Image (tube, grey):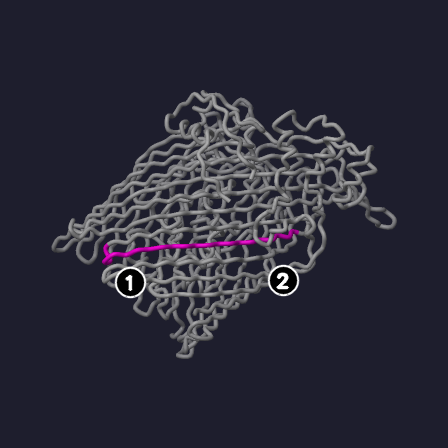
């Protein structure tokens, strides 16, 4: 669980940011150690008017936005915020967690929880993974696509505000349960003998924890040259019972409970509470193929390294919410929200693995077993108030305070490679632990402590034919990060050959073997400087804006926002509490900038049904902590190694939006939008020149310039025009057509910021940087030129039944930029077709059946005509039942 403390490390980092310079000579306290390529769909409102309030809110907003309500999310049976956001026009989902808004990568979007900034427990991404938020606690999702002064200026594609359920109007007691199955859920490898006794709860019981003996050795004389007794003792402390055994996995299941009530306190006050808890246990089995290295030789594409085989993933998700609220005479409201989210992933892969040494050897193969276990947690406490001061001409005052803890705890990472010899005559196969590959263990722990607070003031002024509201406010945010990663490798080549025979890891390193006098084993510390680091972010912001309505036709909104942003990441020496850099170098590591950002919006109201929106704004995309560090991390999607650049700069964006909206009395609607974004110094990734073995290495760097433009269309239409018998059917959908271009700037030579950052990463002089980029100009990473979403819906005449058939497909999008003449790697179109049926059995009970991926599509990334990533997600069936008491 979370530990709320301020230690010497934290104070040192805060001093670095607050003062801009520091003289640090401090010994800090030691910290205790503690995927899928998705699709997009869009959800329209039901014609019966269940989402009318959502449409009215969208219509009344001054800026371009799309909103999904809880009833819309419920209709399609989406289980979390990430899945639900696939329903929004122009949004795509990557890795099941992160959204791309209008073709811009996840770094170009931002996420808030009830209007407040929260830290992310995922160190590989700048934004919160949206799959953490179950749909059971969500009231609505607001995706604002044009910038307004009262929101963070870190804005590119859009801002997602996850708004949790508020206090009930009446007593509520609800129970729900679900059961599911995936077509791939058959016999699959799993390490049942090495798993924790508390895996079903999503927590480790200590089985995977960093051994105390190893921690002591690493902080002392190290693991080189250990005596026989020390080696046996260290080997005994490691988790060795992790062989892959074929098992039949359990069905997917889950349950939830919601309890709430509201009470009148006197004649003008009201107090209420809402609590919710949910639990989900899910297995995902697939066949997965990764190609890590390509080369062109003699005009032909050559695969240098690949892995192909089973992937078994066990997910446990727990969420809990407890909210309290108090209202006084409708002018004053105070809420206290408590939200806890936990998502545990445990994955075993047992796959054929080949490299340049074995890929063309018919009598020799390799088998790789790797395990990833991670617990992601978020705990957020939010206190906010909303007040209308009637004695001061209805002056509005809103305020908030939020205290957040996020953690990613990943102990027990494991990887081992086995040699497989094949008899050329009989075909018999025999295995042994590969001598040329070390076996590795990893332990990682990352904690983010975030605090945010702010206020908003609004003052209305009314005239004969106008209404003017002045608005001003401030937002303040700080985040403290502590991260540590420890790696240990077992040197297989030091072990006598007779002990390496067999394909069971637990047998090779059994107690009998490791205690044999002839057994010798060497260890290697795989931890690097910077694997432990402390980091912090500070943001102070203030804004001023005006909202002016003239007559019945015009509305003008505009203002500016000032932000002062500071960020630093300080590496430690391995296994110590000493910084790896001196005072002067720490000063160079501090990222500081402050700027003013403009926003202007105009709305022309044609009549009660139609309106035009015009928006212009200036925003910025700043580097994340991972982007300014030179240490590598593994991208969970491609499994490539990615590093940042200490000289990375912010991207500045000019945003233009025009949208026409038509809201009909029947509940039908139609909208068409045009958008354009001019990006200076966009943050992109390119592959570094590397050897022909191992995973490719990517550099995060500034390109020279980029632009994105496109058209969006969204509609909802009933089918009564076909005939009266079709009146209870409707079709809804959207289409996005867009294009983008990024100019890397390699042609500018030594004056190019990109060339300078590349030379820094390669540790070479500018003149020796070669043209490694295949396409100096290409589309932005993650951009799809087209996205199509369609939904056919049906509601029975008695409102006891409803059904939806939802289809989505997106155009190919660049995931891996090409180098050395190799084409860009693109994720291929995924044709997603889902079906949902709901039976409102009684007034208080609902039965829902959902089938996902009816077409049994395979997710794929292709590069140079080769599938470098393939995954078969299977077809998923889920049935759920909800009842109210």
Is residue 315 part of the magenta span, yes or no? yes
Circle 2 packing at 10 Å, graded few (<14), some (14-19), many (20+), is: some
Disc 1: which residue: 264
Residue bounds of the magenta highlight: 311-331
Instruction: Indicate the position of residue 791 as horizontal and vertical percent values.
Output: 46, 65
Indicate left or right for 669 with 123 as reference. Answer: left
Determine contact: label 2, label 1, CB under 8 Å.
no
Q: Position of residue 655 (x, y in %)?
A: 35, 44
Could you give the CA–CA distance between mark 2 and mark 1, rounded to whole angstroms?
Answer: 51 Å
Residue 748 position, x and y percent, is 46, 29
Residue sitting nearer the eye, 263 or 286: 263
- Examine the rendered structure and indicate whether residue 756 appears above or below residue 363: above
Residue 158: in sight, yes or no?
no
Tell me: residue 539, above or below residue 317: above
Q: Is residue 767 above or below residue 697?
A: above
Residue positioned 69% across, 27% down in the render: 224
Alpha-carbon neighbours of circle 1 within 10 Å: few (<14), some, or many (≥20)? few
Instruction: Verify whether residue 237 appears in magenta.
Output: no
Please provide percent x and percent y for residue 194. 68, 48
Give the left or right position of residue 488, taking residue 511 as reference: left
Residue drawn at (34%, 48%) of the image: 383
Q: For mark 1, give the secondary structure.
A: strand
**Residue bearing mark 2:** 183
Image quarter of the C terminus: bottom left
State the image quarter where residue 412 is shown.
top right
Q: Of 435 and 509, which appears nearest the observer? A: 509
């Amino acid at each position: 669980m979370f530990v709320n403390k301020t230690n010497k490390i934290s104070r040192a980092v805060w001093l670095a940011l607050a003062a801009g310079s520091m003289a640090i000579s401090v010994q800090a306290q030691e910290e205790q150690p503690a995927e899928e390529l998705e699709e997009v769909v869009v959800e329209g409102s039901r014609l019966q008017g269940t989402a009318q309030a959502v449409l009215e809110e969208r219509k009344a907003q001054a800026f371009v936005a799309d909103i999904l309500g809880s009833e819309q999310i419920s209709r399609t049976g989406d289980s979390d915020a990430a899945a639900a956001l696939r329903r929004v026009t122009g949004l795509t989902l990557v890795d099941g967690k992160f959204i791309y808004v209008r073709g811009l990568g996840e770094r170009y979007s931002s996420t808030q929880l009830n209007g407040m900034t929260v830290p992310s427990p995922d160190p590989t991404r700048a934004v919160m993974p949206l799959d953490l938020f179950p749909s059971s606690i969500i009231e609505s999702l607001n995706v604002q696509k044009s910038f307004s002064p009262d929101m963070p200026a870190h804005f590119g594609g859009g801002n997602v505000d996850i708004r949790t359920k508020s206090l009930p109007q009446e007593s509520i007691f609800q129970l729900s349960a679900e059961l599911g199955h995936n077509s791939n859920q058959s016999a699959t490898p799993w390490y049942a003998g090495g798993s924790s006794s508390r895996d079903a709860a999503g927590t480790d019981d200590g089985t995977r924890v960093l051994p105390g003996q190893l921690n002591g050795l690493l902080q002392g004389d190290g693991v080189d040259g250990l005596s026989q007794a020390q080696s046996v003792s260290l080997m005994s402390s490691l988790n060795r019972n992790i062989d892959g055994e074929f098992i039949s996995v359990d069905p997917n299941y889950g349950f939830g409970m919601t309890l709430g009530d509201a009470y009148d306190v006197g004649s003008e006050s009201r107090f209420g509470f809402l609590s919710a808890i949910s639990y989900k246990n899910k297995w995902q089995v697939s066949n997965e193929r990764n190609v890590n290295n390509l080369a062109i030789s003699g005009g032909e594409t050559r695969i240098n390294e690949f892995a192909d085989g089973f992937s078994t993933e066990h997910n446990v998700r727990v969420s809990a919410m407890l909210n309290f609220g108090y209202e006084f005479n409708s002018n004053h409201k105070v809420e206290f929200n408590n939200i806890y989210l936990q998502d545990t992933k445990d994955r075993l892969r047992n796959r054929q693995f080949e490299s340049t040494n074995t890929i063309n050897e018919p009598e020799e193969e390799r088998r790789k077993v790797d395990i990833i276990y991670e617990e992601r947690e978020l705990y957020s406490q939010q206190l906010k108030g909303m007040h209308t001061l009637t004695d001061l001409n209805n002056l509005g005052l809103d305020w908030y305070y939020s205290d957040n803890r996020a953690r990613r705890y990943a102990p027990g990472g494991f990887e081992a490679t086995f040699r497989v010899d094949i008899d050329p005559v009989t075909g018999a196969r025999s295995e042994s632990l590969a001598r040329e590959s070390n076996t590795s263990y990893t332990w990682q722990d990352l904690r983010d402590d975030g605090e945010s607070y702010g206020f908003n003031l609004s003052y209305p002024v009314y005239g004969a034919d106008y209404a003017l509201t002045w608005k001003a406010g401030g937002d303040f945010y700080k985040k403290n990060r502590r991260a540590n990663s420890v790696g240990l490798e077992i040197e297989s080549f030091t072990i006598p050959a007779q002990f390496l025979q067999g394909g069971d890891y637990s047998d090779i390193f059994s107690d009998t073997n490791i205690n044999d006098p002839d057994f010798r084993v060497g260890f290697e510390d795989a931890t690097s400087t910077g694997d432990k680091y402390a980091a912090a972010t500070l943001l102070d912001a203030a804004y001023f804006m005006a909202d002016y309505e003239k007559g019945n036709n015009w509305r003008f909104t505009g203002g500016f926002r000032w932000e002062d942003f500071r960020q630093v990441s300080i590496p430690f020496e391995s296994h110590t509490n000493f910084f790896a850099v001196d005072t002067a170098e720490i000063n160079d590591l501090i990222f500081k900038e402050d700027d003013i950002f403009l926003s202007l919006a105009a709305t022309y109201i044609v009549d009660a049904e139609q309106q035009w929106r015009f928006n212009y704004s200036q925003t910025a995309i700043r580097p994340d902590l991972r982007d300014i560090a030179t240490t590598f991390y593994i991208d969970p999607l491609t499994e490539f190694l990615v590093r940042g650049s200490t000289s990375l700069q912010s991207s500045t964006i000019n945003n233009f939006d025009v949208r026409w909206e038509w809201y009909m009395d029947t509940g039908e609607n139609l909208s068409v939008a045009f958008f354009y974004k001019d990006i200076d110094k966009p943050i992109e990734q390119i592959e570094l020149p590397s050897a022909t073995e191992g995973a490719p290495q990517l550099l995060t760097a500034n390109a020279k310039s980029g632009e994105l433009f496109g058209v969006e269309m969204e509609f909802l239409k009933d089918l009564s025009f076909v005939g009266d018998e079709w009146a209870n059917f409707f079709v809804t959908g959207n289409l996005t057509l867009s294009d983008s271009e990024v100019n890397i700037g390699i042609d500018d030579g030594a004056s190019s910021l990109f060339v300078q950052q590349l030379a820094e990463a390669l540790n070479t002089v500018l003149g020796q940087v070669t043209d490694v980029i295949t396409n100096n100009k290409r589309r932005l990473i993650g951009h799809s030129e087209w996205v199509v979403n369609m939904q056919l819906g049906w509601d029975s005449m008695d409102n006891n039944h409803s059904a939806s058939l939802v289809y989505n497909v997106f155009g190919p999008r660049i995931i891996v930029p090409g180098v050395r003449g190799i084409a860009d790697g693109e994720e291929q179109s995924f044709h997603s077709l889902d079906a949902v049926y709901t039976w409102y059995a009684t007034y208080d009970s609902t039965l829902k059946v959902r089938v996902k991926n009816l077409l049994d599509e395979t997710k794929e990334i292709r590069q140079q005509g080769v599938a470098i990533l393939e995954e078969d997600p299977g077809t998923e069936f889920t049935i759920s039942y909800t009842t109210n008491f």
